[in-house]
Image (cartoon, rainbow, N blue to C red):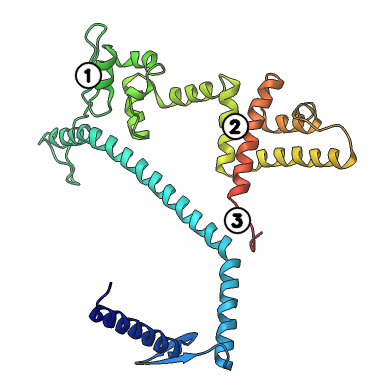
Amino acid sequence: MLSDKKKWKLQKEKEKKKYYLEQKAKVHRPDFVIKTGDKFKTFDIKTKVGKSLNELQKSLIKIQQGTEPIRNFIEQNQVSTFRKELEIQKSINRELRSVRGILGLYLNEEFKKKANVKPSELSFLGDLQRTKYVPQTPKPVGHKREALTGAGMRRFMELSKIDNPVLIAKIFPKNQKALQIAGFINLRFLCEAMNVSANEAFLYICEGMTKTNKRWLKHRIEKEYWRGSISIINLVKYYKEKVQQYKAKGLAKYTIKSLFKSPYLLQFCTEHQIKFKSYPDFTRHFKKWKHHVEVLEKSKPKGLLN
């Protein structure tokens, strides 16, 4: 049983709680509060100003909902722009790394050029006569030859257990991760060490691109698409339009095989100077191109801009 003192305390607490709830119910809470300087103004929805503010808020919500696709598109572009800047920065860093390794050779050459001055006769213009400088490159000893330092060749040759830079041509295709080509500056020194001139390097690139049909399609069609070409988009669009036309007319389904035998694909191959070995070869490439186009369509915002 509770004592009289405890009962009295419980009753007081109930009364306090009841009084608090009554006072809370009496307090008026406005719908809008606007700060003007150091003062606050309150408005209710029932008043004219309150109604206008309520309508303004609703219109702002509608604008926010309508512009949501645009904001999402801008955010995606910002992310893609940031990624592109990051890739550019990475490529610059790769070039700088290659330059740091090879810069020592260049500075050494320049130092020798300046140091190789004969204090002989001066012309009336005051020019010094300089002897021709030939850069010192590692000379072969029998069948062996050391690699230039700073281009990553020395470490690759040690890992691959080869004693001549020319042998890199046989080992690199099998183990490409062991040698990181930082950039075109690094590539130039690699070619020079492997006895490959600029014309020969370009010739080998052309021969390599056209050696297999898969490689040629990759460079001629796919990489052109990533540069902004719409050739693949037109091909996929033509295929989808034909599927819809056949479906609307109640004809047999228009398949990839129908596209393979169509005059449109023949014209497409003639214009781009490509060919497909067989129907399975075309199917494999077309499905991949179709996937790229569909991903691109999904990335575009749908709404006000569309």
Drawn side of residue 84 relative to residue 292, left or right: left
Q: Kindly indicate the quadrant of the structure image that contains residue 118.
A: top left
- Numbered label attached to residue 138: 1
Depth check, mark 2 against mark 3: the one in front is 3
Q: Amino acid at mark 1?
A: Pro
Counting from the top left corner in percent of width and height, residue 91 is at 37, 41
State the residue lying farthest toward the front: 1
Give the spatial CA distance, label 3 vs label 1. Answer: 59 Å
Q: Residue at x 25, y 20 (%)?
A: 147
Counting from the top left corner in percent of width and height, residue 124 is at 18, 45
Q: Residue at x 32, y 82 (%)?
A: 11
Q: Amino acid at mark 3?
A: Pro
Indicate the secondary structure of the residue bearing disc 2.
helix
Image marks 2 and 3: residues in contact by CB distance under 8 Å = no
Of the image marks 1 and 2, the number of the one nearer the N terminus: 1
* Quadrant where the C terminus is found in the figure: bottom right
Q: Residues within 10 Å of mark 3 (few under 14, many from 20)?
A: some
Give the spatial CA distance, label 2 vs label 3. Answer: 29 Å
Tag 2 residue: 220
Decide which of 211, 174 is in the foreground and name it.
174
Q: Amino acid at mark 2?
A: Arg
Depth check, mark 3 against mark 1: the one in front is 3
Residue 20 lies, with reference to residue 244, above or below; the image says below
Tag 3 residue: 301
Q: Residues within 10 Å of mark 2 (few under 14, many from 20)?
A: some
Residue 214 lies, with reference to residue 116, above or below; the image says above
Counting from the top left corner in percent of width and height, residue 243 is at 79, 38
Q: Kindly indicate the quadrant of the structure image that contains residue 305.
A: bottom right
Of the image marks 3 and 1, the number of the one nearer the N terminus: 1
Indicate the secondary structure of the residue bearing disc 3.
loop
Residue 305 lies, with reference to residue 24, above or below; the image says above
Decide which of 242, 187 is in the foreground and name it.
242
